[in-house]
Amino acid sequence: MNKLNKQTPMVIKSNILADMILDQLSLKLETLKLLDVFLSRIDTRAIKKTNEELKNQLVAGGLSPEEAEEQSRYFGIKYIDAYVEAATVTLTRPQLAAMLGVSRIRADRMEDYCSMLNAKVICGYRPDGSFKRVVLFPVSSYDKETDIIKLTCNVMDEDLRRCFFDVVDSRERRGFEYMKYQLKDITEMKTMNAARLQIYVRRNLYRKSWTIDVEDLQSIINRKKQSAKDFHRDTLKPAVAQINEHTDLVLEVEPVLVRRQLKQFRFTCSEDRKSADSEAAQTDVPEKKTYGYFQNVFLTEEELSLCRQSWSDWEERIEELSNYKERSGKQYNSDFAALRNFDRRKSKDSASHGNAGSGSVFSGKLPDWYADHGRGFESESERQDMLRQIEEIKRNWPVGGQTANDEDESRDDED
């Protein structure tokens, strides 16, 4: 069971959006993962705040609260801009790869990732059976030069907008109820069956224990024609195993036999108390945010502030650490401490370089932080460039009391 990691992004998903996903059997697993990446990055209350701002302005202009409520539905162009801004997420390609839990995403695959989100979904069901099909993400783009992907959900459709942004306000108790879980709980799922089962379970988590007919569960997970026995063995059991392995849910599913025939499944589920206790124990620990091109440098707000105060080139130092961690695979208990250690080494190197002509001797041994990991270099040319730099150091620094150039001259004299 994975323990809670405070650095793991959280997903807030309205129950109505979850229900809509369960209804859309055409959605692929990659699309669902991208959707959850998006949900983990947006402020689900941003549009509600914009609406409140608009209503307050209308009331200040002389309208009654009821009239302001009605008029706010017909917002001006500047509020459309605010809506689009709230509904847009920008990510670098390495950031997206890290959030999806993969090592890298090739640039030539970005078009595939964007097209996944252009899928149409059915929403806005009415009691009379009416419905409409809308595009989930009308805008998804990738700029190869900046290596940035931009995602904008369909905020212009009122029904879909509410699915994304109208979650329950804990004070007003208005809006849709929602589920909240770690992003990895979905990105670590290997099959759509497991992902859909997890969403279904989270929708019913408040019940703790319940039963469901085999046919009804099959219609939720997939509609593949299978016997009850085959469905239990080949579809349900592997999905339950994935959920128990990769999430904080403790799920048990038992077959219910009626006259020796499998007719129902009994679900018993709870959230792992060890993870919950771990979360409670860490509530006083400052949350760390990710920085650097590869989003692998973790710093608290206080640590970031100290970086700004300590070094004028603090951004370059963070990028240097980010590149080094990505290339070497090195991890630190404290990235802030690693930055300070790098600073001390730089200071020592500068002092040694300044005294090189007055007797300082370079041992010829590379510093502890350097390691040639071979495949860690992005290309052969990068490795050769590093070797050239090492040769430059050997030529210009005293090695064992004698520079490399001195050794060459000595050999010439002997000849």
Image (spheres, grey):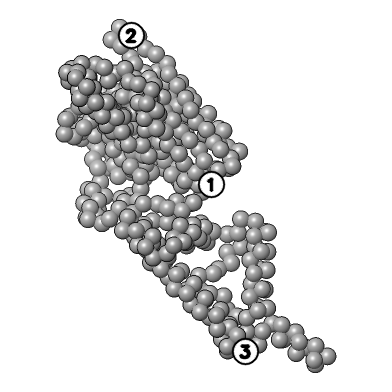
Q: Residue furthest top?
A: 128
* Residue 104 in view of the camera: yes
Q: Residue at x 68, y 64 (%)?
A: 384
* Residue behind mark 2: 129
- Of 203 and 99, nearer the camera is 99
Circles 3, 2 touching at the beta carbon (< 8 Å): no
C-alpha gap between disc 2 and disc 1 = 44 Å
Identify the element where label 2 is drawn.
loop
Q: Quadrant of residue 110?
A: top right
- Of 63 and 272, nearer the camera is 63
Left or right: where 152 falls relative to 180: right
Name the kind of residue labelled 1 in the image. Answer: Arg
Identify the disc placed on residue 401.
Answer: 3
Q: Residue at x 45, y 39 (%)?
A: 90
Q: Residue at x 28, y 38 (%)?
A: 180
Judge the density around disc 3: few (<14), some (14-19), many (≥20) Cα neighbours within 10 Å. Answer: few
Name the kind of residue labelled 3 in the image. Answer: Gly
Residue 148 image offset from top left, x and y in percent: 52, 41
Residue 146 image offset from top left, x and y in percent: 55, 43
Q: Is residue 334 above or below residue 344?
A: above
**Between disc 2 and disc 1, whose residue precedes?**
1
